[in-house]
Image (cartoon, coloured by chain):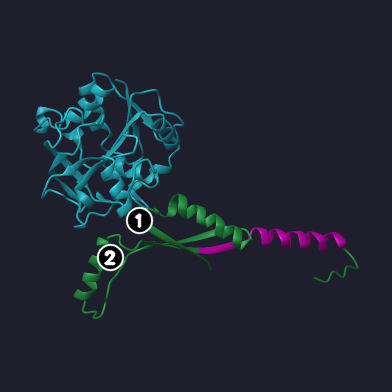
Chain colours: A green, B cyan
Amino acid sequence: MGLLVYGEPHSCLSGLTAALKALENRIMKARVIVTLKNGVLDPQGKAIEGALGGLGFDGVGSVRQGKVFDVELTGADAAAAKANLEQMCEKLLANTVIENYAIEIV
Amino acid sequence: MKTAVIIFPGSNRDRDMFAALELITGSRPQSIWHGEATLPDVDLVVVPGGFSYGDYLRSGAIAARSPILKDLVSKAEKGVTVLGVCNGFQILTEAGLLPGALMRNAGLNFVCKEVLLETVTDATRFSGKFQKGQVWRCPVAHHDGNYFADAETLKSIEDNGQVVFRYADGTNPNGSLNNIAGVMNAKGNVLGMMPHPENLVEPLHGGLDGRLIFESILAAA
């Protein structure tokens, strides 16, 4: 970053501070996908599968229903955000007895 | 015997539980709001049925993260008797106090009817007044009562005698693995069950079969 400051140094510095602050408060978007583990019966997925067949869609092998969470986070550190989201999944977003989760920073 | 009932936003069987506990123990239970930090010193804590937080996310998931749960977990670790019925069972599994999970009923329908339960063991503080193998009537009313645990967990709870009640042959209303209707923690002081024993405790209910659970707890206290 070139800092050619000939006048009004204060306003320039405050601009830089503001830019750094904006970076810190940046909104990061993440998507968490929660799916049922293999071997866990999914009666809702089965019902959807049947309904698709009923609508005339051929060739639907199977349907498994899951959940998507779009989460907005403040901060610029993607690795820290991912670690944070993992904790959120373990503690609330997924029930790891029956569900798996995947995290994407988008 | 001193008892307490935890109430969450969306609990709706708390009053039925109150009435049953008062009838059988002879003293009024304390009602504890989920936002409280500590439970009073009681012999039995009940987590009642209902639709806490509208079943948002997963049945019982949000309630299991309520402030009062911290103290419930610590009291359970100290050996206090805890009974979770229906949504209470879902909350206790979500809180990690009981093994397994309760999923959408296999038939996808809400079931509200009477089933038959078989008492698998009478050697627990929840079933001492039953005979081993005794079949008894009990109402169920739920949408997410389909008990699931992985093969390893299932084997360990069966081997350890943690399965206390099963749906008797042909009456499994929800697809629960091994017909499991009620399961305990390894220590034997926390029981969760989908059926509602509190709804079959006085003659106007059409039977008294549900009393035996409360009488068992009373006798063991």
Answer left or right for A84 relative to B158: right
Rendered image: mark on residue B157: none
B109 w.r.t. A65: above or below: above
Q: Earlier in the sequence, mark 1 or mark 2?
A: 2
Answer left or right for B200 relative to B26: left
B205 vs B158, nearest the viewer: B158
- Residue B201 colored magenta? no
* Magenta stretch, residue numbers: A9-30
B208 w.r.t. A67: above or below: above
Answer left or right for B145 relative to A91: left
Q: Nearer the viewer, mark 1 or mark 2?
A: 1
Residue underneath mark 1 = A98
Q: Tell me the amino acid under the disc marked 2.
A: Gly
Answer left or right for A54 relative to B78: left
Rendered image: mark on residue A45: 2
Provide residue B97's location: percent of width, then percent of height: 37, 40
User: Which quarter of the figure has residue A74?
Assistant: bottom right
Q: Tell me the amino acid under the disc marked 1.
A: Ile
Query: Residue at point 29% right, 44% down?
Result: B157
Query: Residue at point 37% right, 46% down?
Result: B94
- Residue A17 colored magenta? yes
Mark 1 nearby-residue class (10 Å; few <14, some 14–19, many ≥20): many
